[in-house]
Image (cartoon, coloured by chain):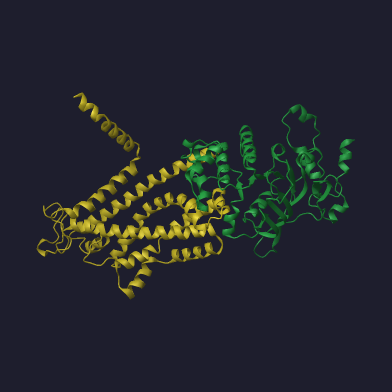
Amino acid sequence: MSQLASSRRPAVRRTARTRRRIGRLPLLPFIGAVLLAVMAVFIVVVPMLPGFDPLTQNLSMARLAPFTDAAHPLGTDSIGRDLLSRLAEGGRITMSITLAVVAINVVLGIILGLCAGFFGGWIDNVIGLVSDANLAMPVVLLLIAISSVTGPSATLMIVVLGCTFWMGYARVARAIAISLRGRDFVVAPQILGAGAAWTIRKHILPHVLPQMLILAVTDIGVVMLVQAGLDFLGLGVQPPSPTWGGMILEGQKMLRLSPWQAIIPGTAIFMLVVGTQFVSQLLTAESSTPLRKARRANV
Amino acid sequence: MMDVRGEPLLDIDDLRVQFQVGSGFGAKKVVKAVDGVSLSLHSGQTLGLVGESGCGKSTLLRALFGLSPVAGGKITVAGKDVTHAGRRERRMLSNHMQMVFQDPYSALDPRMTVHEIVAEPLRVAGRYNSREVEELLDRVGVSAEMSTRRPSEFSGGQRQRVGIARALALRPRVLILDEPVSALDVSIQAQVLNLLGDLQQEFGLAYLFVSHDLSVVRHIADEIAVMYLGRIVERGAADAVFRGPEHPYTRSLLASAPIADPTRSRQRPPRTLAGEPPDAANPPSGCAFRSRCPQAQDRCAEQLPQLRESDPGHSRACFFPEIPIRAAAS
């Protein structure tokens, strides 16, 4: 008995600590984290289930309502494909595209923003001009124009979105670089004869990365919405591959007869966007706390 | 004491730094931030450079490291002309001359550990050695177990010690100290000044010590140069300048230095410097100090006084240095 109790004590302490940490989480970020976790598990687990099949059509089983058939828990679409499978597969495709787009955005934004902020002068002017031109360009129109030549594809959408949503990162990175470049700890390596690349990598990039993470998490939701919109317009991933936006497009035609076809993927998008927004709130608060501490220490 | 034998480690000859100000449609003006400054520094020597804010001290220091636009003159470090040195030459130069910054809070990267901060010069030079870093930190009084901490856990004095360790990492012979203690508490100032004194003896360092605090300069400097609006107006051995200041600006500076003892402070006649320093973009003709000088005459507006030796090793840029000595005596 006593042996058992003593061996358990650390585990008990650990759960107590975890509970305390969760208890300290503000409500909204907590909800956001749970939402994202549920979505992630869903996307990973469902394809491992025995009945997973997002593509096979079965017109005799078309437009089954959710929760009526054990083989199709979320029902089927207008040509009898399993909605649960399509939701998971669509989520996987949508999420990979979104993450690829955000990754391209972050890398482009950091490189261009740091160069603009650190070097200033004509480099800053040119990058600012490109950024403004990009902001003024309507993405949808651009995508329609290019895909009218090449035909729509997922790769094209990744490239176009990747090159049109970096400006936010660039602006924040530039602002931080400008605020740091006159500081003595950035001047010191220049006195040593270190190159600009060294100075930026060692002394500016580490200050920029946490802010970029916050922006990226917020942006996941935005990019996903834009992408769903483009899928909806038929400019993104082509059928029969499912995407959440594409599923809404298909469901929209049947809104009267089988509203769940659009409502289910719509709910998934809603949950993910809300989840990322709530989590980004937490990251913002976390990152500003040490900053405030440091400021207090400085004064 | 002063060592005037041999070649100077740092020699600044007629250095000029100019900035263009005012853009757009107005005529561009040239600000002569540093205007014909000559200084030299020998091994083991401390040269105090004093002057009020905006007189060009910091610009002069930045020019030494290629961070201000040099318009003319020559900077020689250890016999090599480095006035317009490129990046590779800067790396060589950093083995001879290093800098300690004024503000210990902005001089250290808050995201690096103290060990990494001191290691950086060695890493840039490509000869990083963990033990050497620990030795440097130990030498300036930062214990080994603190080296993995970040600057935010250090006090101002400790941070300045770290800044000094970083400056010493490449074993330079000249340290440029830009008001190294002005941001510290008075009690901490003494500790850091003592550390600097010890290091100077141990490594035979030469210091160019910039400050506006005359009591600090008097404590540490062998020789003093007084700067006003980009020019050196008086230069000489520290004792000589403090006992018998010859330029009216030096006299006003000495007179306005606060005295810690209230009784003595009350006995001293109030003789503070009137007015603001003139606009550097639009300095007075002739002697730049004449607009605030108590003994300015017509000649001061017409001609620029040159730095001239009065006694051996003591020079000033003033046409009428003798007058107020008599006035003060009466």
Left/right placement of residue A299 relative to residue B34 reads: left
Looking at the picture, tell me which residue is in the foreground, B259 or A236: B259
- Residue A241 in the image: x percent, y percent? 22, 64
- Image quarter hosting the N terminus of chain A: top left
Q: Which color was chain A given?
A: yellow
Q: Is residue A258 above or below residue A292?
A: below
- Residue B27 in the image: x percent, y percent? 70, 64
Q: Is residue B276 visible?
A: no
- Residue A196 in the image: x percent, y percent? 52, 57
Left/right placement of residue B259 relative to residue B187 reads: right
Q: Residue at x 22, y 27 (%)?
A: A5
Left/right placement of residue A21 relative to residue B21 reads: left
Q: Is residue B261 visible?
A: yes
- Image quarter hosting the C terminus of chain A: top right
- Residue B63 in the image: x percent, y percent? 65, 54
Q: Residue at x 42, y 49 (%)?
A: A210
Looking at the picture, tell me which residue is in the foreground, B177 or A110: B177
Looking at the picture, tell me which residue is in the foreground, A207 or A280: A207
The image quadrant of residue A166 is bottom left
Q: Is residue A181 above or below residue B3?
A: below
**For the view shown, which residue lies furthest in the top direction?**
A2
**For the view shown, which residue lies furthest in the bottom direction?**
A149
> Can you tell which chain is drawn green?
B
**For the view shown, which residue lies furthest in the left direction?**
A60
The image quadrant of residue B19 is bottom right
Number of numbered discs overlaid on the protein picture: 0
**For the view shown, which residue lies furthest in the front direction?**
B6
